[in-house]
Image (cartoon, helix red, strand yellow):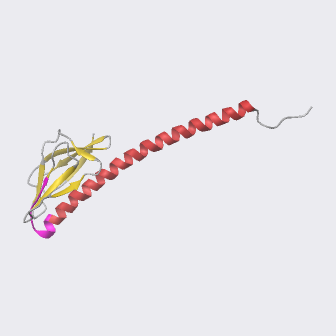
Amino acid sequence: MRENKAFTLLEMLLVLMVISVMLTITLHLQALINRDQASERQVKHFVSELNYIQAKAIGQQKTIHVTLNPYRDYITLYEQGEREPKRLPLRGGKILPSSNINGLTFTKDGHLKQFGRIDIRFGEQDYGFIFHIERGRFRIVKK
């Protein structure tokens, strides 16, 4: 008798089915990871914007007020001595109405005049930015 060392059609279909299920799961998980990473990149960008505004207030020795209105996808900067406000986009973010402050004022020393929490949604994730009154410090809470 002759031995058949090849795969049968049924075995081949079973192997292809297993490969396709594994590929589908992998692609779905990769999409979820990419979405989370995009939200975290947006948060880091917002933090760098706030750090830049604080450094600008210190460097130019002037007060800068930041307005954060609910349901907006941008923040508005009012600089001391400037006539026109500047808008900075939140890049995929939206300010939530659950925030308990609607503006921040950085003094010429980089300190904050207000304290409180600003809630912003980046993608599908909500983040709370909690501002402390001393030295312009804040922390981020993922909700």
* Quadrant location, the N terminus: top right
* Left or right placement of residue 4 versus residue 76 in this view: right
Answer whether residue 119 is magenta in the image: no
Image coordinates for residue 48, horizontal then vertical, percent: 26, 58
Identified at 9% across, 51% down, the residue is: 114
Q: Is residue 128 visible?
A: yes
Image coordinates for residue 24, horizontal then vertical, percent: 53, 38
**Quarter-of-image position of residue 66:** bottom left
Identified at 14% across, 66% down, the residue is: 58
Measured along the vertical axis of the image, is residue 7 above or below residue 107? above
Which residue is at the front of the view, 5 or 136? 5
Which residue is at the front of the view, 84 or 35? 84
Answer whether residue 59 is magenta in the image: yes
Identified at 38% across, 49% down, the residue is: 37
Residue at the far top: name it. Answer: 10
Which residue is at the front of the view, 130 or 72? 72
Q: What is the span of residues highlighted in magenta in the rendered image?
A: 57-66
Q: Is residue 133 visible?
A: no
Query: How many numbered callouts?
Result: 0
Which residue is at the front of the view, 62 or 82? 82
* Left or right placement of residue 23 versus residue 136 in this view: right
Image coordinates for residue 81, horizontal then vertical, percent: 7, 66
